[in-house]
Image (cartoon, rainbow, N blue to C red):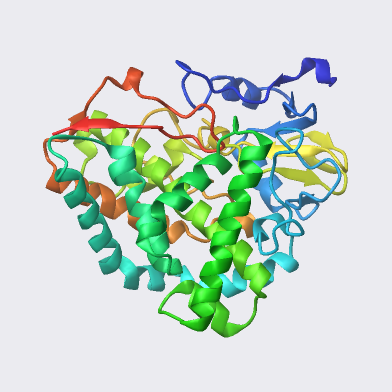
Amino acid sequence: MSDTDAVPFLLRGPGKPFPPPEYAQMRRRDGLARAVLPSGTPVWLVTRHEDVRAALTDPRISSDPTHDGFPRPAKTVGVPSAQEVPGWFVALDPPEHDRFRKALIPEFTVRRIRELRPAIQAIVDASVDAMLAKGNSADLVEDFALSVPSLVISMLLGVPAVDRDFFEAKTKVLVTISASDEERAKASEHLLRYVNRLIMLRTKRPGDDLLSRLIANGVLSVEELSGVAMLLLIAGHETTANNIALGAVTLLTNPEWIGDDRVVEELLRLHSVADIVALRVAVEDVEIGGQLIKAGEGIVPLVAAANHDENQFGCPAHFDPSRSARQHVAFGYGVHQCLGQNLVRVEMELAYKTLFARVPGLRLGVPVEELPFKYDGVLYGLHALPVRW
């Protein structure tokens, strides 16, 4: 296939459904679809569920952006390498990647997250209290969906709650596709400087937090700790905030499912906020979905396309918590599957149960069609969610 047959890379847009209907058309074609990034780099788009899982587990496909041909959405914007930001371990392949993952796994086990439930519940309660104190209306994104995961990740890392606005603002720039290279570089520099100061503080005065424990075990260098802390700060609140906000809209428009324990897994599948996050490059020739991908060619496994594959999930656009959605790839798949997935599930569960129990009259402040969905972000979500009660 020539690049003149390429499809648009980003198919989101105001008034368009998400995931885009074009994903279904790509799944039905032979081989894979070709797209050209705004940087001019051609990539292969992977859209079928089995193909996405194959691409994310094949050792001949790398997540290291230092390899030639790694997809960069713009000329200078993209995933930082571990050389640029030591500790940015999602940009490493095994076995280097394994050292970081092993150091962090104890902090995100089911047992550890279960121990944290009372503290997370307290944060959710406090966020609802603060929202209700505003009167009879609020922006659910700013006043609840962002607040809960921001305060939770701050608690885990030992970040002072008063610094929440700072790292939320910097993260927002980093996940906005339309941000300039200069804006992103400045935000990254400020965030890295902030976590460096935090590590110095925790080295002198250790606390009962993840960062203090990582410093104490000595497995990671100070430079690596900075990258890990920065990565957790970004990943720990932005993805969860988008999931909570989009899920709230879905539950408000499908109130018969409020209070059902099965909604979280189905909401993760349905919304798939990290659709274009898993960028990869082939380091050897490899065949995926009947398509030969040559060494050095970029690959974009589309998470939302996989989670809406009708061959895996019947009537995929329909919100149906009674289905078994556990095979979704909303957290990725393989060695890079999200470490914090147990935490995200608990945050979403407690957020919905608490919000709808304490604010039974909650309703949308504007029609769904008027909500400002994120078409310009690396992550899909909502810029704002006006609500009343």
Quarter of the rendering occupied by the N terminus: top right
Q: Residue at x 56, y 79 (%)?
A: 215
x then y, percent, for residue 113: 38, 68
Residue name at image x 54 percent, y 34 percent: 377
Q: Quadrant of residue 15?
A: top left
Residue at x 62%, y 25% (from the top left corner): 10
Quarter-of-image position of residue 154: bottom left
Left or right position of 69 against 103? right
| Front-lying residue, 250 or 317 | 250
* 27 is higher (above) or lower (below) than 231: above
Residue 81 appears at what percent x and percent y? 74, 54
Left or right of 374 in this view: 283: right
Q: Position of residue 308 (x, y in %)?
A: 51, 32
Q: Quadrant of the C terminus?
A: top left
User: Is residue 68 shown above or below 37?
Assistant: below
Is residue 286 shown above or below 25?
below
Q: Nearer the viewer, residue 199 or 219?
A: 199
Q: Position of residue 105 (x, y in %)?
A: 53, 71
